[in-house]
Image (cartoon, coloured by chain):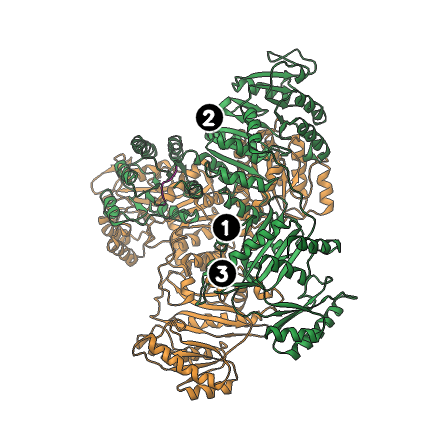
Chain colours: A green, B orange
């Protein structure tokens, strides 16, 4: 059967206004793609059903086939376990009776006779069409585990064999498939095979919106889909995207402009156009700044122009600081001037319901090939150019992390937090309404930007999840990407015509896709900020062996808890290392891991154990638990620790070191001192330093740098 | 059958060196306690087995009965689904053959013939003996859910019917028992009945260390335990406890001493005995202070004594600041002087392996009825008495929270954090080695202490979990108890002779017990500290209706996420409230919940909406999301917010209000300003204010104050 025939089948179902394919139609699809099912055939009469059953061998299942019945079980449309011909005949009549009772004037195409399988593990494979990510394939265990415990995993199409096999290990109950309680494991290849076939099917036929193969009976020998269900509908629209080189060319000019025009520049204090001018100037931007104002001759000492068209020189970025209603006209001038980037600070567009105004603006921009940041944003910072194209105050601590936010509020938090912690930043970008430029474009730029080594993003939705995933998968291999995905708990309001659809809560899909792309998901705003700050400071770990050195036994226990919480494994201490550490610590101290040096020790004990751990090649990362004492006060510890770490670095040994400092207020200053010297240190918390280390490891594993 | 007979059965098993009861013995116990099982009988021959099976009706299950075989399935010792007498005879022979192959010279008592039940939901009921909590009853779904997903819940004995029923709802897959996927629900009373019977059985017979009823087949009509297993051993020791009035009398004198002796007082800077003296004096303690020193005449202006026995006046507390080896002798003098409380700062006891020295010390104390805090502690603070009986520096911010820590490191963090946040504290107590005084004693005191309204405890283990649970259940009804239980991830090293035993990871039991006692479990050190600080500030909520008012839409989304994470429910906004809020906000703002007032609004919009929400009786708690703008700067917001809340309070309206402030660094000062005025406010985080509110609700629900 060729694809044209299948397409005809699907389209005639659509033409008949049906959402679900009938059992024989579904069977046609399964057969064409080699999805194994039990033997089955359609019977029009009771006698025919009995004849088919006898041919298949007993027991069999009978199912009503009716376009008018969506949920067969509800309608009494399924009878299982029929052991002989007489029972089959009776069941046929019963099904017809049930259907008629369920719905007046029900249309009945017949009754499906199906070989009844016994035993095996119930699993399910499905597909959904996500508005952002497109076709997604689902896998889970059948029955309670998937429906009650929501133990399900998703992958974007196309799902190849390797991905399909990885899905089997991505559910919480994965070990069931390998065999538990004396049961044999299932044939994994057979399940992976079904997954890849479903992936191919929905890719070939975008009109198939949802698929349920549930249950599939999987045994050690193979797998068969006992119940199949296809939901069809209009083909989802495909998006048109810029290609990567186009994006990069525009982003290069936007982030590194030789000149900036400020449309709506103002000499008047308190105006946004005034703040933007001041920030550009006071931020130390070295390119040309052109104020644009209908009447002014000069603004803040710079010659002003009535329009960008009046400026003779080439311009790379136009910052808008005019009311929304004037933006489209100004955009046309920007386009005619061939300015590649527009920073749309103004609000008053889609976020207040003015979608049409925004669409108009973007249509003008597209016509001229202008890329648009915003609207409804604070602007952006790019510190390598001393560029503060924003109405907020300048930021000048240069560093390796680029941050972006969809929300202005979160953006303001990024600025406040950065300032108070003196976090080194390469860029802070507001994305606002994301009418055009979005996370993909930023990633494409930051990927090749040597000033950026870590990327942290706040996002409420991805306009094009599929394109994001493609770029993020590539970029995350080179630089850590942290994402705070908001709206975690608001389930997508999708219509759930299938089980898989009902299970595809929007956030579950985000969670799975982000993990697959190697993106580190921050669970809170504070985590995102702390990861952004810490990941750029920590060097890459070279392996999984982590050692805790602690002065407080109590901290050691809490730090160990935090390791497990963050997926880190404490090194099992080899006897020779154990002996080595014991030399430095009191007899009642505990070696093993944590190395508990005990509380009353002088600075040398910290120094000796930390130095030893740094020099030992089998140890890959260090977690320090400092306890405030009179004999080793906080700043003494901080200085010795920084010194020992620096000493190792000067010998080319650079390992991740994080520290938890417990004690009186002096531990705050000591923590800051350490942080500034590349040791991620916090007071009053045992969990945060370990969480930052955990984020580093998550990235390092995914990127394969260890 | 009476209990004496059962005891004989158990003891003869023990005498024979058996850990597990045989199937007939187990059946005896089930019968005596009315635990329903399938019909079953022991057959000695194949013919007898066939005869029994015919009497029961087919199908049947055959199981080998042998004291030498612990895991029957492993030994090929179970054959199910036998449909006729011939099959039963063959199965009998096969079982015997399997057993002999499994173990040389195996002793076979016979073969158990059991009626085979069909259908129903598999569940499990079990019991374990926890070293701290004693007998614990377990409940879970049978099969994969409990074994792979670890979906299990525990209760301390005695478990009454109401508790038993609540266990059915305490597992993640609870809805399965109510019927899913067209299945009927199970008879809940039948399961609860089995739970209470197992509880009674293990209470009556402490020698039964573990119980497995797994699987139990539960249907809509009843429940039967298909496989039962009892592990027996030595009766666990029972503890001897002080009674509550004794504890309280001693604690009253320790926390409110009229006089304090410092054993090992010193005039020399840097000595612990000097720090303690200075802290007592400088802290402003108004009672008498008696330095004790072998030779000195006077220390820090106070007359010194060679021994406490030389002091004429009555003494309530002796603080020890002498080396460990001298402590027992000094304790004897303390005892003879009839001092009720000893604060044992010295280390060098059990924590360094000197258990014998500690045991000796405690024996002396017990002889004289002296209660001992520590050893190996920083001492304790009790601010209502200006009492700083510690070597750390004084702390003087009076407030309503009492904190304790098992670890000195965590204690130092409490002090540092308190100081930096100016947290109001009633007490900070070090428990250290907990040789005597522990969490129970502190709770007993704080329960009736009007200076304490919130209790926060760090703990690594509970010496007597059962006694703690009894006191905590009572106290938590009056005052919130927050606990940071460390060592979450270290599973108890218990021998697992039963499934239930293997599933009873120590932390799972702690988690269940703490929840049942109404204790709020903090998942991190920082959470414990923040909850301690915030819970005393927030008034009790009067209901579950929570409203978010936010200036930043982005914060609104993150705050909503945090509500779901913390078990809080956003009020479904009634139309009239929706209309009311709309009057205050711009047309493009969003009413509903969150109320999004949008970012560009003046102070009045915040004031109007907050005032309205406070005055509206249907709204019970408020979460504010502030966004830093030029039109409403941080301190303007903070002042208006504090004013509106104060205005409501003056009218007797006191609702919990928490706030998340996003913006530039000025939001830090604004947050502090708000916190000091009873609004739990944080900069740069949307999750922490909601977590504190969530903790308040957790307590309020458990205590029934709403």
Q: How many marks?
A: 3
Image: A253 above or below A77: above
Circle 2 sits on which residue?
Answer: A398
- Where does residue A180 sit, x and y in percent of width and height? 44, 64
Kindly identify the residue that appears in the image at 66 percent across and 40 percent down. B595
Figure quadrant of residue B368: bottom left
Dot 2 lies on which element?
Answer: strand
Q: Chain of mark 3?
A: B
Dot 1 lies on which element?
Answer: helix
**Left or right: A702 as drawn, with respect to A57:** left
Which residues, given as a range, are shown in magenta?
A: A540-544
Image: A328 above or below B296: above
Q: Chain of mark 2?
A: A
Around disc 2, counting alpha carbons within 10 Å, would you say few (fewer than 14), some (14 to 19), or many (20 or more)? some
Quarter of the picture holding the N terminus of chain B: bottom left
User: Disc 2 or disc 1, which is closer to the eye?
Assistant: 1
Q: In the image shown, does A360 or B411 lie closer to the viewer?
A: A360
Circle 1 sits on which residue?
Answer: A163
User: Disc 3 or disc 2, which is closer to the eye?
Assistant: 2
- Where does residue B89 sit, x and y in percent of width and height? 44, 85
Circle 3 sits on which residue?
Answer: B151
Q: In the image shown, does A347 or A557 lie closer to the viewer?
A: A347
Question: Distance from label 2 to label 1 (Cα)?
Answer: 40 Å
Question: Distance from label 1 to label 3 (Cα)?
Answer: 29 Å
Q: In the image shown, does B597 or B558 lie closer to the viewer?
A: B558
**Left or right: A3 as drawn, with respect to B49:** right
The stretch drawn in magenta includes residue B381: no
Kindly identify the residue that appears in the image at 69 percent across and 77 percent down. A90
- Where does residue B637 sit, x and y in percent of width and height? 60, 32
User: Disc 1 or disc 3, which is closer to the eye?
Assistant: 1
């Amino acid at each position: 059967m060729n694809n044209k025939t299948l397409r005809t089948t699907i389209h005639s179902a659509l033409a008949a206004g049906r959402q679900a394919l009938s059992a024989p139609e579904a069977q046609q699809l399964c057969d064409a793609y080699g999805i194994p099912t039990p033997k089955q055939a359609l019977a029009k009469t009771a006698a025919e059903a009995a004849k088919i059953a006898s041919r298949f061998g007993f027991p069999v299942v009978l199912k009503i086939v009716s376009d008018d019945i969506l949920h067969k079980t509800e309608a009494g449309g399924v009878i299982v376990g029929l052991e002989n011909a007489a029972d089959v005949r009776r069941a046929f009549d019963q099904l017809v009776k049930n259907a008629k009772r369920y719905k007046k004037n029900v249309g009945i195409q017949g009754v499906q006779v199906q070989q009844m399988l016994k035993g095996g593990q119930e699993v399910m494979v499905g597909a959904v069409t996500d508005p952002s990510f497109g076709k997604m394939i689902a896998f889970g265990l059948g029955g309670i585990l998937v429906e009650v415990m929501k133990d399900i995993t998703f992958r974007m199409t196309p799902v190849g064999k390797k991905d399909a096999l990885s899905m089997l290990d991505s559910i919480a109950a994965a070990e069931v498939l390998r065999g538990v309680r004396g049961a044999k494991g299932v044939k994994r290849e057979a399940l992976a095979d079904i997954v890849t076939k479903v992936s191919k099917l929905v890719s070939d036929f975008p009109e198939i919106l949802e698929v349920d193969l549930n249950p599939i009976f999987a045994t050690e020998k193979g797998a068969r889909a006992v119940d199949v269900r296809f939901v069809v509908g209009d083909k989802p629209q495909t998006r048109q995207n810029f290609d990567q080189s186009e994006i990069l060319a525009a982003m290069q000019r936007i982030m590194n402009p030789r000149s900036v025009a400020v449309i709506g520049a103002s000499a008047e204090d308190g105006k946004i156009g005034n703040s933007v001018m001041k920030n550009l100037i006071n931020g130390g931007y070295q390119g040309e700044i052109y104020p644009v104002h209908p009447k002014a001759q000069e603004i803040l000492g710079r010659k002003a122009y009535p329009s960008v068209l009046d400026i003779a020189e080439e311009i790379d970025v136009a910052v808008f600081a005019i009311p929304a209603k004037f933006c489209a006209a100004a955009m046309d001038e920007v386009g005619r001037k061939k300015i590649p980037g527009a920073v749309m600070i103004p609000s008053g567009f889609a976020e207040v319901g003015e979608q049409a105004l925004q669409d108009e603006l973007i249509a003008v921009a597209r016509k001229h090939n202008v890329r648009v940041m915003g609207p409804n944003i604070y602007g952006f910072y790019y510190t390598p150019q001393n560029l503060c194209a924003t109405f907020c105050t300048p930021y000048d601590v240069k560093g390796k992390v680029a941050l972006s936010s969809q929300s202005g509020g979160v953006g303001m938090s990024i600025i406040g937090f950065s300032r108070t912690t003196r976090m080194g930043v390469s860029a802070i970008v507001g994305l606002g309404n994301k009418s055009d430029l979005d996370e993909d474009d930023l990633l494409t730029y930051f990927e090749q930007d040597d000033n950026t080594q870590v990327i942290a993003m706040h996002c409420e939705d991805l306009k094009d999840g599929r394109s994001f995933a493609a770029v993020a998968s590539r970029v995350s291999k080179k630089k850590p990407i942290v994402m705070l995905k908001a709206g975690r708990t608001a389930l997508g309001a999708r219509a759930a015509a299938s089980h898989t659809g009902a299970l595809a809560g929007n956030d579950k899909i985000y969670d799975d896709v982000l993990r697959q792309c190697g993106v580190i998901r921050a669970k809170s705003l504070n985590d995102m900020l702390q990861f952004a700050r810490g990941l750029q400071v920590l060097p890459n770990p070279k392996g999984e062996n982590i050692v805790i050195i602690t002065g407080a036994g109590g901290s050691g226990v809490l730090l160990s808890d935090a390791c497990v919480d963050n997926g880190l494994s404490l090194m099992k201490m080899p006897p020779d290392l154990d002996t080595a550490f014991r030399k430095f610590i009191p007899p009642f101290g505990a070696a093993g891991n944590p190395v508990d040096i005990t509380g009353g020790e002088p600075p040398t004990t910290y120094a000796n154990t930390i130095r030893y751990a740094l020099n030992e090649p089998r140890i890959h990362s260090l977690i320090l638990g400092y306890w405030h004492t009179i004999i080793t006060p906080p700043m003494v510890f901080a200085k010795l620790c920084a010194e020992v770490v620096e000493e190792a670095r000067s010998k080319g040994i650079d390992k991740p070191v994080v520290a938890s400092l417990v004690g009186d207020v002096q531990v705050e200053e000591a923590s800051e001192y350490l942080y500034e010297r590349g040791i991620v240190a916090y007071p009053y918390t045992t969990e945060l330093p370990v969480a930052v280390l955990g984020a580093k490891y998550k990235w390092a594993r995914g990127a394969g740098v260890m």
